[in-house]
DNA sequence: CTGATTTCGACAATCATTCTCAACTGTGCC
DNA sequence: GGCACAGTTGAGAATGATTGTCGAAATCAG
């Protein structure tokens, strides 16, 4: 059956996405697409969705689901190390944080209830200093 | 400040939703709607959406955003006390947990980065014993 | 270069959720 | 009870994010 999923080809579009993502903010696929277009790219929306998803699978980008339900992406700072974020709800700017005590705690709780295949989501959101100053609170 | 938002009227539909919600599982608005219909109700989908949202605002029901982006609801066990869940991804069954150390930790991190108006999401998901046994893992 | 395969991108399709609006119904008041 | 009337309802349309389709274009092994 699965003899190693073939590595994605390095196309112009994939390169463009990787370059565009070289920032510190979480944005939606649509927002990244607009930015790419505004910089002269002719990349298609579906391609941006596909690219971001595949990059997220590889751990190259972080993906989080906002309260609205839309998925936000940004380039991952920490390689494939496990981590979480403190993100600005107004501009998307985020810092990576780690929650050392929590990882063990999660598994303890799960075991107590005999739940298997545990996953967890921890997201802190707020309004960053710049956005607070700009009244985007 | 609060010029008292008028309390929602107690209609047949609102009563039906409240009754249907008397379980322990997280389900989507559509799923609750189907269940109500299958029990003979003629309630409309939009009404279920509206009802669940308003109940969530009042703290009567818990709402969480699943990885897929859809919102899941269930009746809240803990009144309006702050809490989090360990939820089964296969059947929705959940237990409420609390994460005492975390609440303070979140604020400490936020302050360190000067982020204001902090909010947090913590969700544990897994597969419950029943679903594991049934091979829904 | 050549052919097998993958990826593109415009556009249609899906799916959850929200909106519109005419009909209906709690609620307060007589 | 009966009335007035603002809050609710429900069918269906509309929205908005995401995914699927499919012929054209690009990548890569030989
Ligand atoms: Zn900001
Ligand atoms: Zn973690
Ligand atoms: Zn289960
Ligand atoms: Zn908490």
Image (tube, coloured by chain):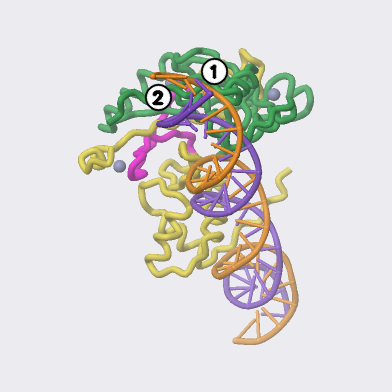
Chain colours: A green, B yellow, C purple, D orange
Whether residue A22 can be seen here: yes
Whether residue A67 can be seen here: no
First-in-chain label (2 vs 1): 2
Occupied quadrant, residue A124: top right
Label 2 or label 1, whichever lies nearer to me, is 2
How far apart are labels 2 and 1 at the CA level? 23 Å
Occupied quadrant, residue B127: top left
Q: Secondary structure at mark 1?
A: loop
Q: Is residue C11 above or below residue A58?
A: below
Q: Categorize mark 1 by other alpha carbons within 10 Å: few (<14), some (14-19), many (20+).
A: many
Q: Residue reaching furthest right?
A: A134
Label 1 marks a residue whose chain is A
Residue at left 52%, top 27%?
A: A63
Mark 2 = which residue? A6
In the rendered structure, which segment of residues is drawn in magenta? B81-102
Q: Is residue A115 magenta?
A: no
Residue at left 38%, top 33%?
A: B125
Q: Secondary structure at mark 2?
A: loop
The image shows residue A52 at horizontal and vertical percentages of: 54, 28
- A3 on left or right of B10: left
The image shows residue C19 at horizontal and vertical percentages of: 68, 56
Mark 1 = which residue? A76
- Residues at marks 2 and 1 on the same chain: yes
Q: Is residue B95 magenta?
A: yes
Residue at left 61%, top 25%?
A: A26
Residue at left 36%, top 44%?
A: B92
Q: Quadrant of the C terminus of chain A?
A: top right
């Amino acid at each position: 059956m699965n003899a190693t999923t073939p590595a994605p080809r390095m196309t112009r579009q994939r390169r463009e996405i990787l370059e565009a993502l070289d920032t510190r903010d979480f944005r939606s696929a649509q927002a990244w697409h607009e930015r790419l277009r505004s910089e002269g790219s002719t990349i298609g929306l579906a391609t941006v969705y596909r690219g971001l998803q595949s990059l997220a699978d590889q751990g190259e980008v972080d993906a989080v689901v906002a309260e609205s339900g839309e998925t936000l992406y940004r380039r991952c700072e920490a390689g494939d190390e496990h981590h979480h974020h403190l993100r600005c709800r107004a501009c998307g700017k985020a810092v990576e944080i780690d929650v050392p005590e929590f990882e063990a705690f999660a598994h303890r709780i799960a075991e107590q209830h005999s739940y298997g295949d545990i996953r967890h989501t921890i997201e802190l959101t707020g309004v960053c200093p710049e956005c607070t100053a700009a009244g985007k609170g």
